[in-house]
Image (spheres, rainbow, N blue to C red):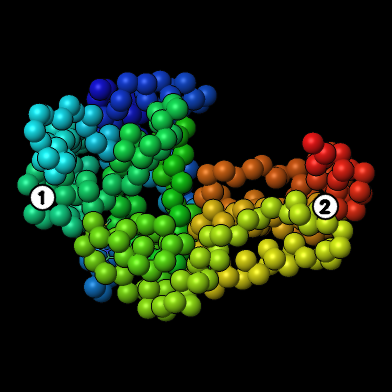
Amino acid sequence: MVITTLPATPDEPVTECFFYPGSMEVLTSLPGFPQPLTHPTSPTFRVDAIPGKGMGLVSTRALKAGDLILSERPLLIIVRGMPVLRPYGFTEEQYIQYSFEHLATCVQVCLNRMRPEARAAYMALANSHPKDTCGPIMGILRTNGLCLDGLRPGVENEWKSYSAVCKDISRLNHSCSPNTQPRFDMVSLSYQLFAVRDIAAGEELTYQYTDAARSAAARKAGLKPYDFVCSCVACKAGPASNARRAAIAAFRASGQAWILDRTLPDDWFPSKCREQLALIAREGLEHHPQYFATTRGMMEAYICLGDAQRASAWAAKLDKILWEETRVDVKALLDPMSAQAAYEAHPLWRIRVDEVRAGKMFST
Ligand SMILES: C[S@@+](CC[C@H](N)C(=O)[O-])C[C@H]1O[C@@H](n2cnc3c(N)ncnc32)[C@H](O)[C@@H]1O
């Protein structure tokens, strides 16, 4: 295990890290690491009391979808669980407790290394596990830790990744129709929080603690560790909202069948994508990967049809989905006039129009 303070600069915010071997190398091998934080041009939020939810974040000005709300280095990044050997005869429950006790010791080491104001900020965060026998430091970690992947090469299992605790982002309350989404930027070792749709001044900022595209019952189960019952519009809406969310999660934004089947009208796939986007807007799920996938589906549908004008309009929407992990660079497709060569080089260009190209692309 590696205990370190990153980045090692006295004048920048720093993060106390408790790493598996190998994670430091992942970061230090990134070209340009550590980059300074990028901040919004003017303040966007305040921390305030939210009726029935404790503290939370509130926007202080109108925000547009895709706007950066804040950038923040976590106070702490720590392994999610300690890989300790299970003592003989321990039940699963005893083993979890034993592992928590080891983790608490590591959290304490990190807290001791923190600057006093950072330690005070950590200790001021909410604790939805007041009876945790390892004390408030573990309760705070369990309440406020964001799951952080990608710092261990080749390891995807969530229990083998990290938890990150932040002074501000950890103050965000949950919503099943969240208006923000954080994205971790490795090279600046920071979370960037984005508005996923337009937000009015004075609106509460929220994000999802559990996959919001699942049913109300599954979300309720996912929220259990946070010790509150969500009372958002979707949770009260019942089966109709569940059905819409199930349809959103099941949608596949791939137009292969439409490209090959010429009996389908040209608008068949774009209209399916439009229906999906309307459902997403209705349920407030713009933060979800399905929103990115469907927006990309729209752009690609118009590329297949050889319509650079419309494809560029959708490329511009895609370019604003900055919170999506799997985002693609569409800068070359933004202007339909100057992008003609880029469109013609695109593997999907006119593939729905030109049967020879379609045949070549999908021949086995
Ligand atoms: C990560 S903290 C969020 C910030 C917290 N409200 C505070 O005062 O610092 C998680 C805790 O906030 C509260 N919370 C979050 N979302 C909520 C919601 N939608 N409704 C009620 N309480 C919520 C719960 O107590 C939960 O355990």
Q: Is residue 251 shown left or right of residue 96?
A: right
Q: Residue at x 37, y 25 (%)?
A: 23
Q: Quadrant of residue 12 in the image?
A: top left
Image point 41% across, 78% down: which residue?
238
Left/right placement of residue 209 relative to residue 251 reads left
Q: Position of residue 94 (x, y in %)?
A: 10, 40
Mark 2 beta carbon near ligand 1 (under 8 Å) = no
Q: Residue 351, image x and y in percent?
A: 85, 48
User: What is the three-letter code of the residue carrying label 2?
Assistant: Leu
- Above or below, 112 against 257 in this view is above
**Residue of label 2:** 260
Quarter assignment of residue 218: bottom left
Label 2 secondary element:
helix
Res. 195 in view: no
The answer to whether residue 339 is above or below residue 59 is above
Query: Mark 1: which amino acid?
Result: Asp
Give 270 or 195, whichever is nearer the viewer: 270
Count of numbered marks: 2
Would you place residue 7 above or below residue 139 in this image? above
Q: Which residue is label 1 attached to?
A: 132
